[in-house]
Amino acid sequence: MTERQSASGVADAAPVVLEMKGVTKTFGPVVANDDISLTLKRGEILGLLGENGAGKSTLMKILYGLYSPDKGSISIEGEEVKIKDPKDAVSRGVGMVHQHFTLIPRLTVAENIVLGAEPTKGGRVDMARATRDTEELCERYGLRVDPRSRVSDLSVGVQQRVEILKALYRSARILVLDEPTAVLTPQETEDLFSVLKELVGDGLSIILITHKLGELRGVSDNITIIRDGKVVDTVKTSDTDEGELAKLMVGREVLLRVSKEKSEVGEVRLSAADLVVKGNSGSVAVHGVSLEVKAGEILGIAGVDGNGQTELAEALAGTRVAESGAVLLDGEDITKVGANGRQRLGLAYVPEDRGTKGLVQDFSLSENNAIKTYEKAPFSSRFGWIFPKAMRRSAAENLRAYDVRPPDPDARAGSLSGGNQQKAVLARELSGDPGVIVASQPTRGVDVGAIEFIHGQLLKQREEGKAILLISLELEEVRSLSDRIIVLYNGRISGEVGPDATDEELGLLMAGRGMDESA
Amino acid sequence: MSEERRDSGDSFLRKSLRDAGGALVFPLIAIFIAFVIGALLVLASGNNPVAAYVSLIQGAVGSPTAIGRTLLNATPLVFTGLAVAVAFRAGLFNIGGEGQVFIGAITAAWLAVSVGFLGIAAIPIVLLACVVTGFIWGAIPGFLKARFGAHEVITTIMLNFIAINLATYFALGPLRSEGIVPGTETIEAAARIPAIGLGLGRVNYGLAVAVLAAVVIYFLLWRTKLGFRIRAVGLSPGAANYAGMRIGTNTVLAIAIGGAMAGLGGGVEVLGVYGKMSIPFVSNLGFNGIGVALLGRNHPVGVVLGALLFGGLASGAQEMQFATDVPLDLSDVLLAVILLLVTATKLVELIIGKRARALASGTRLDEGLGN
């Protein structure tokens, strides 16, 4: 921590390395960036905070040369520059770590790092030197990675480190990280932040893009908040708190913590017994999971992304066939029942991916609203006809009840913001008064305002005595909503804890420790 | 409440009109640009573009005979355009229209001779048979895709060869007539689709069948459960699967229905125009259907309009070649440029500016025309 203080002290007086002034970028009628200005000093970690769609990524894509701004200027080290393309950005010392890694899994760490900028000897790639260079880099910045190991064998946290090394190898002085913690466990996040602090101690400057309020607290010096394409404010991290940040980000008071009433827990509604499910690659993703969800409770499933959550949810909802084991709804075996049938029996499913599963983007909201019920009256007749008017009427009702904007049944689903799309999915799934709800990452990529609404709806369903299974990568969400929490690791349950479990406890379970007693 | 209702109904009507207008503007721009480019070509070849275009238009719509020729050309293209459009709505490229036409044609040529004694009553029976054989032939690539993942572009192309050769074998083998012209026996006049008359030349009630087919496909796609499924599968297989729709079944059905349309088109050609299947049979109907569907944005109404444009250019070009020194092939150039512009929206954007993008919605291959 003392090191932190000094870094921040240096940052105040340090020279400005990057200045973006009056940057404006429009896409058709949409103003993505509206006169945005920000400055980054040497040795500073600047948090770039904003809701999804606020314009953070557009701004960084401009900096990285992927878009050219309509107006405004960019100065690096005091010199005004026009960044033509990513290659140009790299040559000016800008490095970018994307949310989705750009590594080639079959290649080694060193091969990935030098790819595109390989050291050569007599026209051939000098792998020995590449390995040596990588080792040197690792040592210099205190990043522990074996240059010879294959990327596919590395954990996500280490892969991210390789991405950072890739930027450093190209002599990045300004490092941009786009939502870097989305894929990490709490411990890995800690590790990443201590790496970042070492980097700025070495004179680098870092921009950290995030929509998570809490995580900037321990790491950034200043925070620039963007809302609707405009800079709302730039604040010193030490002078602010989460409540203020949330308000700046959303533009109004936000309820950060949900207040949860005690509820009557009833009978077991949904249960799984020894469920084994294969993933898309054909390998087993869920290894014999058993669980029970009772009426009036929310069972949270925590875990790092890709530990079988998706497959488990799909097997429970019926969109994926289980290899073995059983799914029971109200004591009845529904393992052989398809998604449609399960829905008719009162199982609602909010899929994690509203873009490709929850909604047909090019369908209207009214068609999407009826996509599971189009075969029933009043949407269709026995003779195969459908009635668009009836669909439109029902959609209009649902959209209004769930505050979807715009509440226009003829609007194309894809034209809505993420939060409103998710509300539209929720409206459809919950309107049929289901007894059991499987909600997979219901607030992924959704803005704070919509999160508040969705959480409220889930709690309302719980109070009405519904059995809810909530899968989420956001620990805070799982903790604040759930009555019990199960942690998945490598497709197995690594433990069950209460909602008051600490970050450390959950983190250990998410990393697979504590398996022995339950596996 | 009532005011709100009226308001939404009103805006819906306006929205539909705006959509229809928007859908037309882009192809019209493409056609205009194509004609400008065509004019330059005519000029470069030392001819007068004004004279060429006047005779082109006269040849397409200048007289009842010209209109008749245009309609006659357009009729089969409506069917093959629909064959592509229905499949496309399910996210599939049906390149097999050509073969499906041949299957329908040989079916008609065979059955109409056998049941010709029924007179006019034979016509619906024969056309129904064409629908069935076209459907079955179309179902093959659908099944191969759904069951084994074989790409429909490859399989439909390959099935074209099989269908063409199969139909040719029957027409020149077991079903060959005694006559001089190679092909099947001539169908009794009473069992053929009668001409409309009105000075329109050989235009027959097959045109009515084509329009009816377009209406049926429209209702199928937007007013039935099956159409709802087909469109959902085409736009988002993931979401359709999640909603409990069977991707495989709908894949087979969509391409089979497309095959039925093309098969019907083949039957209408035999019953309405030729009265038999002579070898070589009329070719490229299936392939031109792809262009018709593209131009018509895979919408039944657009397909009819696209077919009329194709048909009109073909008949106008004959007149143009006759009246001026400009060769027939100019119509092919025009069509090629139009299709290029309609599909390559970016290109038009370069030519007429950014506003094109808003107008172009629905023409790109990767999106459908919202309802």
Image (cartoon, coloured by chain):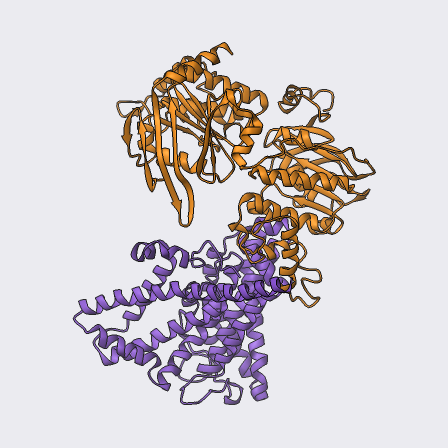
Chain colours: A orange, B purple
Could you tell whether A507 is left or right of A432 in the image? left
Name the residue nearer the viewer: B352 or A29: A29
Q: Where is A277 relative to A336, above or below?
A: above
Residue A39 image offset from top left, x and y in percent? 38, 27
The image quadrant of residue A514 is: top right
Quarter of the figure with residue A377:
bottom right
| Residue A385 drawn above or below residue A132 | below
Q: Position of residue B68 (x, y in %)?
A: 39, 83
In x, y percent, where is residue B168? Answer: 45, 72
Number of numbered discs overlaid on the protein picture: 0
A62 relative position to B229: left or right: left
Q: Which quadrant of the rendered structure holds the N terminus of chain B? A: bottom right
Using the image, determine if residue A221 lies above or below residue B351: above
Q: Position of residue B140 (x, y in %)?
A: 55, 61
Q: Is residue B165 visible?
A: no
Instruction: Name the residue located 73 percent from the left edge and 42 percent from the top edge.
Output: A461
Q: Nearer the viewer, residue A420 or A468?
A: A420
**Residue, x 74% and y 31% (percent of image)?**
A483
Residue placed furthest toward the left: B46
Q: Is residue A163 visible?
A: yes
